[in-house]
Amino acid sequence: MGKLRLLELENFKSYAGKTRVGPFDDFTCIIGPNGAGKSNLMDAISFVLGVQSKHLRSSTLKELLYRKDSDAIPSRRAYVKLFYELSEGEMEDQEAGAEIVFMRQISATGVSTYRLNDKDVTFELYEQQLQKIGVLVRARNFLVFQGDIESIASKNPQEITKLLEQISGSDALVSQFEDLEKKKKEVRVASRVRVGGDFVTRLATATTAADFYAVVVISCLCSSLPYCCMW
């Protein structure tokens, strides 16, 4: 697993102008008094990793723009850059220590755009690159926020299952699974109708008790039909 090496912010929330935070060590603590910007730094990491604005203590992206007290509507843009250092074997065709630069921007009108290594990309490509380093945007498996542990501990079994499905990524396959399950049931029903019809035909042509018994047993063994074994 690689590591976050450096953050660069410009006009994001309480960070006016361009600010660099880092470089980060393998274990880094960020401390400070209330209002120093600790939570906003967590929001910055979440933002550049694709988290929606509603999970960043704001209702719209425009609210993430730094504004002075005199600014009714800020006319500036904002961005967060995350410099990620790869570990050995983490990604094919990439050496240990190679760097990926993730960047997410907000325009003055509140439009979000994404860049990878200084190239514009779609969110889909951006998210795919994050998945390659183990970051699942929807599961938010990269940061533990205040109250997260308590929230997980209070979930019921169904909610825990849903959370595990999000983390594993299996929830993205739910619709595909349900479609296949539906087709499987349709095939079973069609098979029962076909085999059941053959069973009735053979049963009608049985002339002795031995023939009757043979038809029932063979049909049960071949079709595994529950109603056959009731005879």
Image: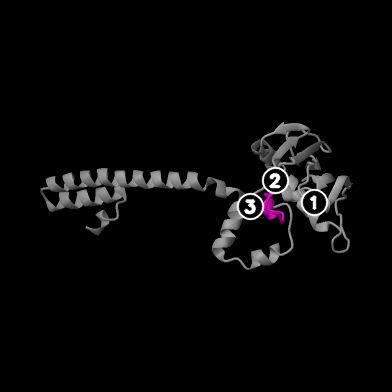
Tell me which numbered mark, 1 or 3, is placed earlier along the sequence.
1
Give the label, 3 or 2, closer to the camera: 2
- The dot on residue 50 is 2
Q: What residue is rendered at 25% in x and 48% in y?
A: 219
Q: Can residue 230 be seen in this view?
A: yes
Foreground pick, 176 / 66: 66
The stretch of residues the image draws in magenta is: 52-60
Label 2 vs label 1: CA separation? 16 Å
Check the image and report above or below for 158 versus 112.
below
Q: Which residue lies furthest to the left in this view?
A: 207
Q: What residue is rendered at 84% in x and 61% in y?
A: 35
Give the label, 2 or 1, closer to the camera: 1
Q: What residue type is labelled 1?
A: Lys
- The dot on residue 63 is none
Asked if the magenta segment contains residue 176, the reply would be no
- The dot on residue 13 is 1
Give the label, 1 or 3, closer to the camera: 1
Q: What residue type is labelled 3?
A: Ile
Percent coordinates x, y for residue 200 in the rendering = 18, 47
Label 2 secondary element: loop
Q: What residue is rendered at 72% in x and 46% in y?
A: 49
Asked if the magenta segment contains residue 57, the reply would be yes
> In the rendered image, which residue does mark 3 sit on?
167
Q: What residue is rendered at 70% in x and 43% in y?
A: 110
